[in-house]
């Protein structure tokens, strides 16, 4: 077992917030949130999403951080410390397995962003392309027997190089550079988009609240909650792991609120960037998972300074993805370092190599034809997403609520959260939410996923 000194910790609260926000802010915000909102009716979905971030996301985030900081361990070790000789560590093991599973498909999509960055730089979208041409570019990328795997390998390599540096000099340092760059690029793009002709129509779609879609289909509500968990990196112990590197004197409530707020704000700003651009180019916001890869390139050719904005857009996506893949890899690495006594260096390289092997089928499974209508539902990539990104995260989120709410107990978790002397506002409300509301809500969406009604 490794002690605290050799595990490392964040050097400042700001460093932790940037790293944890970096984990949360990712493809989930810029790739998945806009198309999920688009497919689920726009404004009403967004409202329900905001409600779930506050009522379920923040309470579960606090639960994960408290378990991590109390034990200073990876997810398996954390449950083992608080519940020795029980089956709880298995829940941590599910989290580590989700790390492998999610990283393996996430790094494939992240690899596409690199490929698109290259297309943008080489001027492929410069003269304007229609959606058929854009679709053909996408298909030829994902159906290539070589490129998706190669780009995924490059992305995993970048991730490994950061995680290898350790907690404060690797992850925290990279986040301190990448996240500010990310914010600036995003603002730039949002302003560009909002000043395009026709932007108002996009905003109207994004903010138009029509609850009839929700009433007609409870799956929309499930998708909003599932998306909130995924976007906040909850349910697999990423926040247990990042919480385990939090110094004892840090203010946990404020840190948790900052992470949840920035993740949500970025999702909204991503909407402000994407929907006006779609409206400007007359692209259907319900295009589905191909939105940022197929619809956006048709826009860059048609807008002033589009080549530059195209490059910026894919760099932005790649940065967002990188700070998330870092956290996915870190969960697995921390397990092997804490529990198996591996060195960080050895863990990083072996695990990245294994992830690459698991990623290859996802990288190569998307044939040319059926892609647009059913990307995460389709292919091996969609299967990995379903098993680990949907089943895995909901099981993990349900488990942490039961663990903190009923087994370890709210009083101990609260004592940990408040141990630095910073009180948790509305603590009784938090207790009620983790014990009752969160587990029941998560169980309900689990039912909606299993019966195929919720899809995010
Ligand atoms: N939150 C990340 C995103 O929105 C994805 C992620 C999920 C990262 C779970 C870590 C753990 O892209």
Image: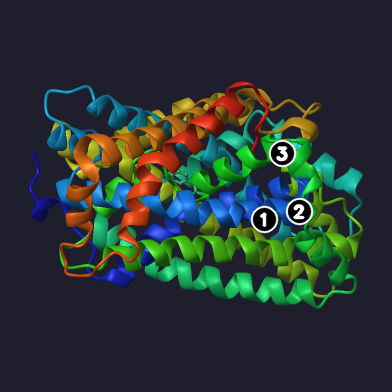
Residue located at (48% from left, 53% from top): 55
Whether tag 3 and tag 2 are in contact, CB under 8 A, the answer is no
Residue 77 in the figure: left or right of residue 393:
left
Query: Where does the image place residue 172, in percent across and percent down from the top left?
Result: 32, 63
Looking at the image, which residue is at 37% across and 37% down? 352
User: How many numbered dots are placed on residues in this image?
Assistant: 3
Q: Label 2 belongs to which residue?
A: 42
Say whether mark 1 is within 8 Å of ligand 1. Answer: no
State which tag comes first along the sequence, 3 or 1: 1
Q: Identify the residue under disc 1.
A: 46
The correct choice, above or below, for 254 with respect to 105 in the image is below
Q: Position of residue 168 (x, y in %)?
A: 25, 62
Q: Quick one: label 3 or label 2, which is nearer the N terminus?
A: 2
Q: Position of residue 206 (x, y in %)?
A: 76, 60
Disc 2 + disc 1, Cβ < 8 Å: yes
- Asked if residue 187 lies left or right of residue 367, the reply is left
Q: Is residue 306 above or below residue 297?
A: below
Q: Nearer the viewer, mark 3 or mark 2?
A: 2
Ligand 1 neighbours mark 2 (CB distance < 8 Å): no
- Quadrant containing the N terminus is top left
Distance, label 3 to label 1, CA atoms, is 32 Å
Q: Quadrant of residue 205?
A: bottom right
Q: Say which residue label 3 marks.
A: 141
Q: How crowded is the residue under tag 1: few (<14 C-alpha within 10 Å), some, or many (20+)?
A: many
């Amino acid at each position: 077992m490794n002690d605290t000194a050799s595990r490392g910790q964040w050097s400042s609260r700001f460093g932790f917030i940037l790293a944890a926000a970096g984990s949360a802010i990712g493809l989930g915000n810029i790739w998945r949130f806009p198309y999920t909102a688009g497919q689920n009716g726009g404004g009403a979905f967004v409202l329900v999403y905001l409600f779930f971030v506050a009522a379920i996301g923040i309470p579960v985030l606090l639960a994960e951080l408290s378990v991590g900081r109390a034990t200073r361990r990876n997810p398996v070790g954390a449950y083992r410390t608080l519940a020795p000789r029980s089956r709880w560590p298995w829940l941590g093991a599910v989290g580590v397995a989700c790390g492998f599973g999610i990283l393996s498909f996430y790094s494939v999509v992240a690899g596409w962003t690199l490929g698109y960055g290259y297309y943008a730089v080489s001027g492929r979208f410069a003269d304007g392309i229609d959606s058929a041409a854009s679709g053909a570019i996408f298909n030829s990328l994902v159906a290539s027997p070589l490129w998706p795997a190669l780009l995924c390998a490059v992305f995993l390599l970048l991730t490994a190089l950061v995680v290898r540096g350790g907690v404060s000099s690797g992850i925290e340092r990279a986040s301190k550079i990448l996240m500010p760059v990310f914010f600036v690029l995003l603002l730039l793009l949002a302003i560009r988009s909002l000043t395009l002709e026709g932007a108002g129509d996009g905003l109207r779609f994004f903010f138009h609240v029509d609850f009839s879609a929700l009433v007609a289909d409870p799956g929309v509500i499930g998708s909003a909650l599932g998306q909130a968990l995924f976007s906040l990196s909850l349910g697999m112990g990423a926040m247990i792991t990042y919480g385990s590197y939090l110094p004892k004197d840090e203010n946990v409530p404020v840190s948790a609120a900052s992470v949840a707020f920035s993740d949500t704000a970025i999702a909204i700003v991503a909407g402000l960037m994407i929907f006006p651009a779609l409206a400007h180019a007359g692209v259907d916001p319900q295009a589905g998972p191909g939105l940022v890869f197929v619809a956006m390139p048709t826009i860059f050719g048609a807008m002033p300074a589009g080549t530059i904005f195209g490059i910026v857009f894919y760099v932005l996506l790649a940065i967002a993805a990188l700070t998330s893949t870092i956290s996915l890899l870190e969960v697995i690495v921390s397990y092997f370092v804490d529990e198996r006594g591996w060195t960080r260096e050895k863990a990083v390289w072996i695990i990245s190599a294994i992830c690459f092997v698991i990623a290859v089928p996802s990288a190569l499974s998307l044939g040319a034809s059926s892609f647009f209508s059913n990307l995460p539902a389709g292919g091996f990539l969609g299967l990995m997403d379903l098993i680990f990104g949907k089943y895995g995260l909901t099981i993990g989120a349900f488990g942490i609520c039961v663990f903190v709410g009923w087994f370890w107990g709210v009083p101990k978790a609260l004592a940990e959260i408040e141990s630095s002397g910073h009180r948790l506002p509305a603590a009784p409300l938090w207790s009620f939410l983790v014990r009752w509301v969160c587990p029941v809500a998560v169980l309900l969406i689990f039912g909606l996923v299993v019966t195929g009604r919720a899809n995010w």
